[in-house]
Image (cartoon, helix red, strand yellow):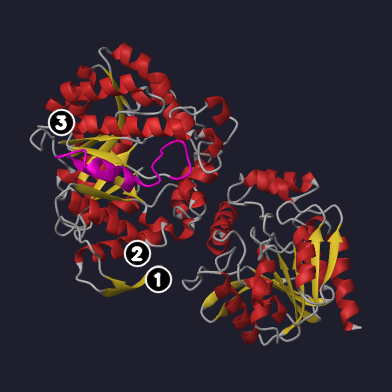
Amino acid sequence: MKAFMFHLMPYASLDMSERDKHPSAWITLPNSLYDPKIGHELYNRYLDELELAAEVGFDGVAVNEHHQNAYGLMPSPVVMASSLARRTEKCKLAILGNAFALREHPLTLAEEHAMIDCITAGRLITGFVRGIGAEFYSLAANPTLSHERHMEAHDLVVRAWTETGPFAFEGKHYHFEYVNLWPRPYQDPHPPIWCPSLGSTETIEWAAHPDRKYVYAQNYSPFTNVCKFLDQYREVAASQYGYDASSDQIGWTAPVYIADTDEQAVEEATEHMEALFNKFLYLPFEQLFPPGYMSMQSYKRVAAHKRNITGGAKMETLMENGVVLVGSPETVRKKLIECHQVLGFGTFVALLHFGTLPADKTERNIRLFAEEVLPAIQPLSDNEYRGFEPAQAAAE
Amino acid sequence: MADCTESKIDIRGTGMYLRRGGSGEPMLFLHGASGVAGWIPTFQALSETHDLMVPDHPTYGLSDEPEWLDGMEDLAMFYLDFLDQMNLEGVHLVGNSLGGWLAMEIAVRNCTRLKSLTLVGAAGIRIAGKPIADIFMMDPDDLVREIFVDQSYADNILNMELTEEQLDIQIRNRVATARLGWQPRLFNPNLRKWLHRITVPTHVIWGDTDKIVDPAYAAEFGKIIAGSEVTMIEKAGHLPHIEQSEPFVEAVSGFLQSKAA
C-alpha cells in the first residue's frame, strides 16, 4: 500500500466568533478575517509539514484546490506542488485535485502540470475534480454545465498531453485552434489521473472505464460508504467492463490523529477535528448543492436528508462511523490493517493536519504515523486482502 | 373554474405544455424562474378580453427538456418559431422576471408578430451596484418570503403539501433557471445595446416593494426603451400579477386600451 499525507492548509487562525456570524467559512466570509502575515506563517508551516512527511517516508504528499474560503487556502494547488517540487526528492506530488473545468482555459493547467512533471522527473499525480458546490459561486461557473464541461476539459487535457500538436480541439465548451503543448509531461503517456470523490456512481463508472482505469479515492466518508463505493469500483470493472480492477485503482482518504494512548488522542484531537467539520467544512445546503450540480435523482436523495446536514458533527460519531481514525499507534495500525483486509485499497491518504490542530501536535502526528503505522501498512498487498466477491459486495 | 385548455403541443420536435383560454387579440404570458402556478385569477381576468396563452418554457414545468437549449438566446429563437408555427399576429407579449428578460430577447430579434410588450419585474439587464437578488444562494423558503409583501401568500405556498410531481417540477425549474441565468447572474450584458430594436409600445410594471429585482430597474427600462411607460403597483413584491391581481389587470388593460385608441 502507498501512503500519502494530505494537507488542506486551512486558515487555522480564523476568529471563530466572527466565523459564526456567517453562514459558512466559504464564498462570502469576509476576507478582512484573513491576516496575510499569519497567512505567511501558516503557508510556510504547512509546507514544512508536507516536507517532513516526505522526509520520514510517506510515498507521497497531497494538496488540493478550493476558492474564497478558510477551509483550504490553496486556490492554486499548482503553486504548492511547485514549491514542493524542488524541496522533495523521491515522493509523489499529488494534486487532489484541480478543477479543470472551473476555468475557461483548462489548457493552462495542463501546461502547469506538465511543467511540474518535467521538473520532478515524473513525480506528479493529477487529480481531476469538478469542484464542490461552493466553487461555482466563487468562480462564477455554471453548475448545470459542470458535468459536461468536466468531461470535455478532461478530453482536452489528455489529448493535449498525449497527441502530437498542433491540433484543433473542437468541443462544445472549449475550442482551441492550436493545441500544441510545450512542455509535454515527463510521464508517458501522462501523469496518473486520480478521481477524488465524496461518493458518486457516475464518477466510478467513468473512472473505471478500460480506456481510463483511473484511481478512485473516497473522501471523508463513513466506513460503510468507503466499502460501498470502493467495492462498487471493482464490481463495475468486473460486470460492466469485464476486467479485474487492480487494488492500485482504489484509495481512501481520512483524517487521522495519533497520540500515545487512545484517550490522549481523542482528548487532543476533538476540538480541532470538530472545527474541521463544523467550522471549516460546513456549508449550507444551497452552497453545497447548487442547482444542476447533481442529477435529479441524487439531488432528491440528499435533499431528503437536508435537515440532517447541520454541521453538528461530534468526534464520537465521526470515530464510530469510521470517518476519522483517532487513537494510539496500535489502534490506528490495527484499524487500517483490518480495513485493508476488507477492501484491499492500494492507497491510503492521511489528513494529518485538520482544522485548528497546532504545529507541535501536527508534527508529532506525522512522526508517529511514519514510525508506528507506515512500516505496518506499506508492505500490505493483495496477499492480505480477503479478495473481492461480487455477491458479497451486492449484499453489503 | 379554469376556463382554459391544457395540452402539449409540438414545436419543431419539442413538446411544450400550453394553457390557453379566452378569445380576442392573442396574448402570450412568459413565466419567471418559479414557473406557472396554474390558471390564476389574473389569467382568468386577462382571458376575458384576450386569447391568452401561458406555456411552460422548454425544460420548465411539464414541457420537454430539449438538447438544444443552452441559453436565453436559444429560448428566444424557440419562441419566434412558436409564433411562426402558430401563425400568431399582433401578439401582446407579457413577461415576468426571467420571462421579462426572455420577452426582450424575443422582441430585439423580431417584433413583426408583436403588438405590445409588457415587462413585469423583469430581469435581463444589470444596473452597476444593484444586483438582482441571488435567488440561488438564498434558502428556498427565505426566497418565497422575499417575493411577497403580504406574507400570507408566502405562508400558503410554504404550507402546501406538494406531490412528487410538483416537487420534481420545482427542482427542474430551479435547474432550468440556473442553466439560463447562473452566469452572468440573470442578465445578458449585450441586451442593453439592442433594446432600441423594440419597436412596439412597451409597458413596464413593477411591484413597489420588489425585493428580487429592485424597482430602480423599472425606471431604468422606462428610460432605455423608447416611448415606454412605467406603472408601479402598490403593496406588491416581485409577482404583482399574483399579489395584486386587480390593479395589475387594470394596469395591463388600461395601457393596451390607450394604445389601441
Q: Residue A216, relative to residue B185: is it above or below?
A: above
Q: Position of residue A211 (x, y in %)?
A: 20, 61
Q: Chain of mark 1?
A: A
Marks 3 and 2 close (CB-CB < 8 Å): no
Left or right? Give the position of B106 relative to A46.
right
Q: Tell me where the magenta segment starts and ends, as one range.
A: A67-94
Crowdedness of circle 1 by 10 Å Cα count: few (<14), some, many (20+)? few
Q: CA distance from mark 2 to mark 1?
A: 8 Å
Q: Chain of mark 2?
A: A
Q: Chain of mark 3?
A: A
Give the quadrant of the N terminus of chain A. top left
| SS of the residue under disc 1 | loop
Identify residue type, mark 1: Lys
From the image, tell me which residue sits under label 3: A57
Left or right? Give the position of A243 relative to B71.
left
Identify residue type, mark 2: Glu
In-front residue for pair B100/B175: B100
Q: Position of residue A75 (x, y in %)?
A: 40, 46
The residue that appears at 19% across and 50% down in the rendered structure is: A119
Q: Position of residue B48 (x, y in %)?
A: 84, 73
Identify residue type, mark 3: Gly
Q: Which mark is residue A290?
A: none
Marks 2 and 1 close (CB-CB < 8 Å): yes
Is disc 3 in the same subunit as disc 2? yes
Q: Residue B104, relative to residue A161: is it above or below?
A: below
